């Protein structure tokens, strides 16, 4: 690599308003763009909507020798206020000095760097600048320019901050909901013992724990309004998913966070009944396949049992859990269809939803 003069003096590194030591009439960048390829390059850069500039590392303090219209719109400076100055004039009191050092090191090493800097427009307003800086060489391999592109990412940064805040709130909510489920479960246990209905209390608590598992898995995603259904389904059925007794077939469907109460309770009731009477009942080594899909504004969850106790006909009565499940499905304007086949129960839950992605 050809030797080149030192770009920065110590004074210029510390003075954000320092002017170059040479006037722009000495830069001679017109000659650099005089050939056909150079003219085409200049015209292309002038017309692009991306803010771009070129600086000359072979001149003292590496002044800007070209800045397109988009650069001037972004910063608020006129061309004559930009040319001949080092790009540090966009920095200010809140600019991260560590990121500035990364830029300086990239220049010294003739390397490419991408950083986000807090910069300042001419009127003093702040904006977050995604800066891409890289060297340009001539045909002989001599460094002739540094190319810089700028993109105002202030909105992106704000969105990131909002997302971080939402996730922090979701974590706090997760903690509070866990505590709430624990308190409710404790109350149910005490009341069950006092009233001599421990079995009923245990059944209620199993539903509470199923809801807790569903919400615990999905709260981090709740900040964006929709959740990935797969992890929630697996968390709800986690106590039963041993020895490959559950086969998960669903895709990456997303559903509104509000749908999890219904889905969680339905899955719990189906799993509880499979344990008592179906594929997972004592003495049988059956399997359950669970599928979930988004279909025309609905989430469709399919439950298929095989290898359990033989079924000759549908049950003649419904227990408390099934009654609760049916009422919740009806309240959500959904449907649940159950077919008791000889090899096991086939159930299809359909819930109308809004939002989420297929």
Image (cartoon, rainbow, N blue to C red):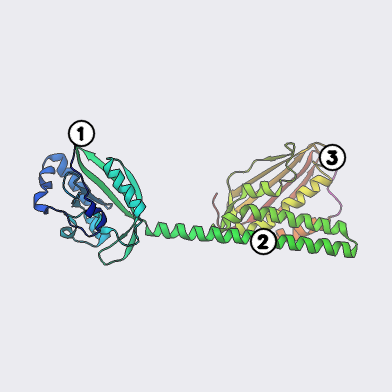
Characterize the local packing of mark 3: few (<14), some (14-19) or many (20 or more) Cα atoms within 10 angstroms.
Answer: many
Based on the picture, tell me whether residue 313 belongs to the magenta stretch. Answer: yes
Position in image of residue 299 (x %, y %): 62, 52
Residue ID for mark 2: 177
Q: Can residue 70 be seen from the camera position used here?
A: no
Based on the picture, tell me whether residue 154 belongs to the magenta stretch. Answer: no
Which residue is at a point 13% across and 47% down the rendered structure image?
29
Q: Which mark is residue 76?
A: none
Position in image of residue 248 (x %, y %): 66, 41
Cα–Cα gap, marks 1 and 3: 79 Å
Q: Which residues are magenta?
A: 311-317
Characterize the local packing of mark 2: few (<14), some (14-19) or many (20 or more) Cα atoms within 10 angstroms.
Answer: some
Q: Which mark is residue 309?
A: 3
Residue ID for mark 1: 141
> CB under 8 Å between callouts 2 and 3?
no
Question: Of label 1 and label 3, which has the lower sequence position?
Answer: 1
- Nearer the observer, 314 or 152: 152
Position in image of residue 183 (x %, y %): 74, 63
Question: Of label 2 and label 3, which has the lower sequence position?
Answer: 2
Q: Quadrant of residue 77?
A: bottom left
- Look at the numbered disc 1 and give the secondary structure of its residue: loop
**Residue 139 vertical placement versus 99 (above, below):** above
Cα–Cα gap, marks 2 and 1: 63 Å
Question: Of label 2 and label 1, which has the lower sequence position?
Answer: 1
Q: Main secondary structure of the magenta part?
A: loop
Which residue is at a point 41% across and 57% down the rendered structure image?
157
Q: In the orientation shown, which residue stands out farthest toward the bottom?
A: 123
Which residue is at a point 24% across and 58% down the rendered structure image?
15
Characterize the local packing of mark 1: few (<14), some (14-19) or many (20 or more) Cα atoms within 10 angstroms.
Answer: few
- Nearer the observer, 325 or 11: 11
């Amino acid at each position: 690599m050809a030797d080149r003069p030192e770009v920065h003096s110590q004074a210029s590194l510390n003075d954000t308003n320092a002017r170059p030591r040479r006037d722009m009439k000495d830069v001679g960048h017109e000659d650099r763009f005089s050939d056909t390829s150079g003219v085409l390059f200049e015209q292309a850069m002038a017309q692009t909507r991306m803010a771009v500039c070129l600086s000359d590392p072979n001149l003292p303090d590496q002044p800007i020798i070209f800045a397109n219209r988009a650069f001037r719109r972004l910063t608020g400076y006129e061309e004559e206020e930009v040319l001949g100055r080092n790009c540090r004039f966009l920095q200010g009191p809140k600019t991260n000095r560590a990121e500035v050092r990364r830029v300086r090191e990239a220049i010294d090493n003739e390397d490419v760097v991408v950083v986000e800097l807090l910069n300042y427009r001419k009127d003093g307003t702040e904006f977050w600048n995604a800066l891409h800086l890289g060297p340009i060489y001539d045909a002989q391999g001599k460094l002739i320019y540094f190319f810089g592109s700028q993109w105002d990412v202030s909105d992106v940064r704000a969105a990131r901050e909002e997302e971080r805040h939402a996730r922090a709130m979701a974590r706090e909510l997760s903690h509070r909901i866990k505590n709430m489920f624990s308190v409710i479960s404790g109350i149910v246990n005490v009341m069950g013992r006092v009233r001599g209905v421990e079995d009923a209390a245990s059944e209620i608590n199993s539903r509470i724990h199923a809801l807790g598992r569903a919400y615990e898995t999905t709260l981090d995603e709740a900040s964006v309004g929709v959740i990935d259904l797969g992890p929630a389904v697996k968390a709800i059925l986690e106590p039963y998913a041993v020895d490959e007794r559950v086969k998960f077939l669903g895709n990456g469907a997303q559903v509104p966070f509000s749908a999890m109460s219904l889905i969680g309770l339905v899955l719990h009731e189906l799993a509880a009944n499979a344990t008592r009477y179906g594929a997972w009942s004592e003495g049988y080594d059956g399997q359950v396949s669970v599928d979930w899909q988004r279909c025309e504004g609905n989430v469709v969850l399919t439950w298929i049992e095989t290898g359990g106790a033989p079924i000759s006909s549908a049950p003649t009565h419904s227990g408390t859990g099934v009654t609760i499940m049916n009422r919740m499905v009806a309240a959500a304007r959904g449907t649940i269809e159950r077919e008791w086949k000889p090899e096991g129960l086939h159930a299809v839950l359909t819930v109308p939803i809004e939002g989420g992605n297929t």
